[in-house]
Amino acid sequence: MTLPAGRLFVTPEAPSHRDGERFRNPDGPVPHGWRDFWRWRRSRRPEPWPEFVEHGVRADLPAELAAGELALTFVNHSTFLAQFAGTALLTDPVWSTRVSPVRFAGPKRVHAPGVPITVLPRIDAVLVSHNHYDHLDLATLKQLQSAHTPLFITGLGNRPLLERAGLTRVLELDWWQTVTSERMSVTFLPAQHWSARGLFDRNRTLWGGFLVEADGRRLYFAGDTGYGNLFRMVADRLGPPDVAILPIGACEPRWFMAGNHMNAADAVRARADLGAPRTIAMHFGCFPLADEGIDTPVSELHAARAAAGVEPEQFQVPVPGRTWRL
């Protein structure tokens, strides 16, 4: 995926989401601070998770795709392999055992990645939505750099971290900025979330989602986000995507998580706002990050779909390792 000079442009009327040093959300909600975080940690009653589960699927990646075909393979959490005819990309790739600043503690995966990292096809681009450890995993990104030398596309402020890790092709985007190549265009979009890798860098780098357009297909990847007007804004400005990938987990308790993490009912509303005819769930069932049980987001999605009259094939629950072809 080559990127000729002069092919990066900014759509007009970008929202005001910076105060000079820190970024803020499009609708104005301020994420909970450390005091509320410790209140949650002291009072939490998490549902138990299993130590490990087998997903029982052996990945069978398509070797070739026809013109206009899109293949999506669920790896885990928010990691998807998206294949178009002639190009492939990854979203928020995580193959590490833990998502944490340290390797000996922190949230640990309960199932193996659905696709071994060693069997990936050639990866042209990697989308990194923000800098939280379950979305920006440096160990995985270093492996991808070594094997594929892809273009890493992320939000403003994240490039220094990635370049210090040895990544050589890093592009930062602001919301509504688009980068184009001969095969693909990628637009960075607003999300309702926050950022931090440590105690003193809160909201100093930008978070967001992505719209990928390739071979006549439009794929929306929401990143990590709470529910808000942003989905309707994306559809109004850019049109509905063919496929939307939306988060449904790490969402309890709602008093603490609602502003930054959608639950299943929120995701069903976001799907309607986007006008996406096909939607796939993510951000569930791999890392115990919040208080809900491992199966709770999927059970709640079944109920939310039924309440909204959405058929299961219109909002699907992916299985790690299984490929879905459009």
Image: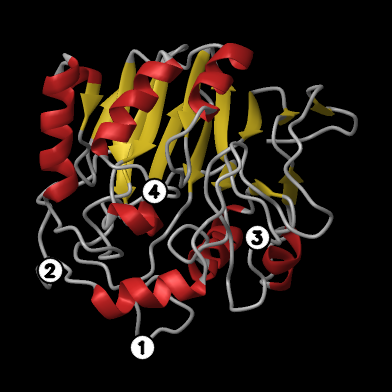
**First along the sequence among labels 1 and 4:** 1
- The secondary element bearing badge 3 is classed as loop
Q: Which residue is mark 2?
A: 52
Q: Which residue is mark 3?
A: 203
**At which x and y percent is residue 32?**
49, 61
Which mark identifies residue 261? Answer: 4
**First along the sequence among labels 4 and 2:** 2
Q: Is residue 90 above or below residue 6?
A: below
The figure's colour scheme reads secondary structure
Regarding residue 62, the answer to whether it shows in the image is no
Residue type beneath disc 3:
Asn
Mark pair 1, 4: CA separation: 26 Å
In the rendered structure, the answer to whether residue 204 lies left or right of residue 309 reads: right
- The secondary element bearing badge 2 is classed as loop
Q: Residue furthest bottom?
A: 104
In the rendered structure, the answer to whether residue 289 lies left or right of residue 67 reads: left
Q: Nearer the viewer, mark 3 or mark 1?
A: 3
Q: Is residue 219 above or below residue 34?
A: above
Residue 113: quadrant of the picture: bottom left
**At which x and y percent is residue 259?**
44, 48
Mark pair 3, 1: CA separation: 26 Å
Count of numbered badges drawn on the protein: 4
Q: Residue at x 12, y 68 (%)?
A: 52
**At which x and y percent is residue 182?**
71, 22
Pointer 3 with pointer 1, Cβ within 8 A = no
**First along the sequence among labels 4 and 3:** 3
